[in-house]
């Protein structure tokens, strides 16, 4: 089979998916650069990885190269180095401190050292005189480092988007599993004579490409569902979630005091900082089965799903404690859903309680 056609037979889906991703990413004007730049780097790395992997596969064909060639060693080392790098590039979108990024790069530097040690020792892997792969004691280092970055990425994702729901967890677990499974399957391809009787060539980069695309979609959806200033879910999500199949068992509504005064007297930047501070206080109070929203200019809400009165009161207490740590005041209304009570009635009731509280707190200045 001609060289180029054989390459496409293994990597066609991966290549067209990466090229499509590149078009989408470079034309995207909605996401912040901190998300777009790592995605660009990741897509480019996957494209390079497909070429490197195929060249290693090509130079490993014993019917063409019956004896070992140094070129295969080079491409094998590059491939094992680039695989964890794909996930490291995605992780960097969540890193804010240089020290943290430096710490995260240490496993990849170790992997780089181990992968290229094949030129001097067989501790990672080597090739026989008949051009067959032989794994050494540290031959699984790239796999371990890749798995480490998967764990880090999941942690960063949940921290960034304050996700505590099963759907997000299931998606991230799925993306992790397809990557791990692909790495295991490809590493277990076994030679038999001059052919592979279990040939998973290209499955790893394909899984990375699919995973990167799905993760990009996930990030994009999370960003568009959220308020830019506070990071909380937006008004549309509030109305969708309040009428979802999960039963709403309670609501907390908040209304910030004197936002207009802060905007007029100090400036809109100060107003945005105030909103962000309240958003952070709400996010810090959330537990599994809850979600926080910015439903208006100075209005916020927390929905409770299938939680009892005790759990709702615990979150309320935690929220009030968080709000005491910032320099702004809010009116708060808390309502627990009664049996067979309509959600719209519940919302009206909690709004009434909030405005009653607002009348009491209005005399307090917004800044202490």
Image (cartoon, helix red, strand yellow):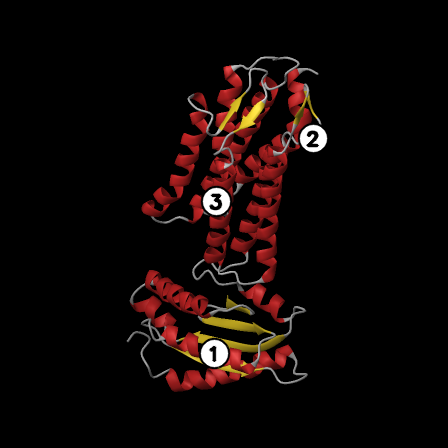
Check whether the beta carbons of the residues at disc 3 and disc 1 lie within 8 A of each other.
Answer: no
Residue 149: assigned label: 3
Q: Residues within 10 Å of mark 1 (few under 14, many from 20)?
A: few
Q: Position of 134 compared to 201: left or right?
A: left
Q: Nearer the viewer, mark 2 or mark 1?
A: 2
User: Could you say which is closer to the camera, residue 96 or residue 293?
Assistant: 96
Residue drawn at point x = 35 percent, y = 47 percent: 100
Mark 3 vs mark 2: which is more N-terminal? 3
* Disc nearer the start of the sequence (3/1): 3
How far separated are the C-alphas under marks 3 and 1?
A: 35 Å
Q: Residue at x 28, y 76 (%)?
A: 368
Residue appearing at x 58%, y 64% in the figure: 237
Q: Position of residue 165 (x, y in %)?
A: 57, 62
Q: Which residue is mark 1?
A: 314
Specify the label residue 148 is tagged with: none
From the top left corner, tell me how far across and down residue 212 is, in percent: 56, 42
Would you say 110 lies left or right of 232 here? left
Question: What is the crowding at mark 3: few (fewer than 14 residues within 10 Å), some, or many (at least 20)?
Answer: many
Q: Earlier in the sequence, mark 2 or mark 1?
A: 2
> Residue tagged by mark 2?
198
Q: Quadrant of the N terminus?
A: top right
Q: Secondary structure at mark 3?
A: helix
Q: Nearer the viewer, residue 317 or 64?
A: 64
């Amino acid at each position: 089979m001609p060289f180029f056609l054989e390459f496409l037979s293994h990597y066609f889906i991966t290549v067209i998916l990466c090229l499509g991703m590149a078009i989408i990413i470079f034309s995207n004007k909605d996401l912040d650069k901190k998300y777009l730049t790592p995605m660009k780097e990741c897509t480019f790395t996957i494209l390079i990885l497909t070429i490197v992997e195929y060249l290693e596969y090509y130079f490993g064909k014993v019917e063409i190269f019956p004896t070992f060639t140094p070129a295969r060693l080079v491409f094998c080392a590059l491939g094992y180095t680039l695989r964890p790098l794909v996930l490291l590039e995605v992780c960097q979108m969540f890193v804010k401190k240089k020290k943290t990024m430096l710490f995260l790069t240490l496993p990849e530097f170790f992997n780089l050292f181990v992968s290229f040690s094949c030129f001097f020792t067989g501790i990672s892997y080597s090739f026989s005189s008949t051009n067959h792969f032989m794994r050494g004691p540290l031959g699984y280092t790239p796999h371990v480092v890749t798995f480490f970055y998967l764990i880090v990425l999941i942690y960063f994702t949940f921290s960034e988007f304050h996700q505590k729901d099963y759907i997000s967890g299931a998606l991230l677990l799925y993306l992790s599993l397809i990557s791990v499974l692909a790495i295991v399957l490809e590493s277990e391809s076994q030679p038999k004579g001059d052919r592979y009787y279990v040939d998973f060539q290209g499955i790893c980069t394909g899984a990375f490409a699919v995973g990167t695309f799905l993760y990009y979609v996930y990030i994009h959806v999370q960003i568009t569902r959220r308020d830019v200033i506070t990071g909380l879910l937006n008004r549309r999500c509030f109305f969708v979630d309040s009428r979802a199949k999960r039963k709403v068992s309670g609501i907390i509504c908040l209304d910030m005091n004197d936002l207009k005064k802060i905007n007029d007297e100090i400036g809109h930047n100060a107003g945005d900082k105030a909103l962000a501070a309240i958003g952070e206080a709400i996010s810090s109070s959330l537990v599994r089965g809850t979600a926080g929203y910015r439903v208006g200019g100075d209005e916020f809400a927390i929905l409770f799903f299938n939680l009892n009165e005790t759990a709702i009161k615990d979150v309320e207490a935690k929220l009030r404690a968080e709000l005491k740590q910032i320099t702004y005041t809010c009116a708060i209304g808390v309502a627990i859903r009664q049996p067979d009570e309509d959600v719209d009635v519940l919302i009206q009731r909690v709004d009434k309680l909030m405005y009653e509280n607002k009348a009491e707190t209005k005399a307090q200045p917004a800044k202490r």
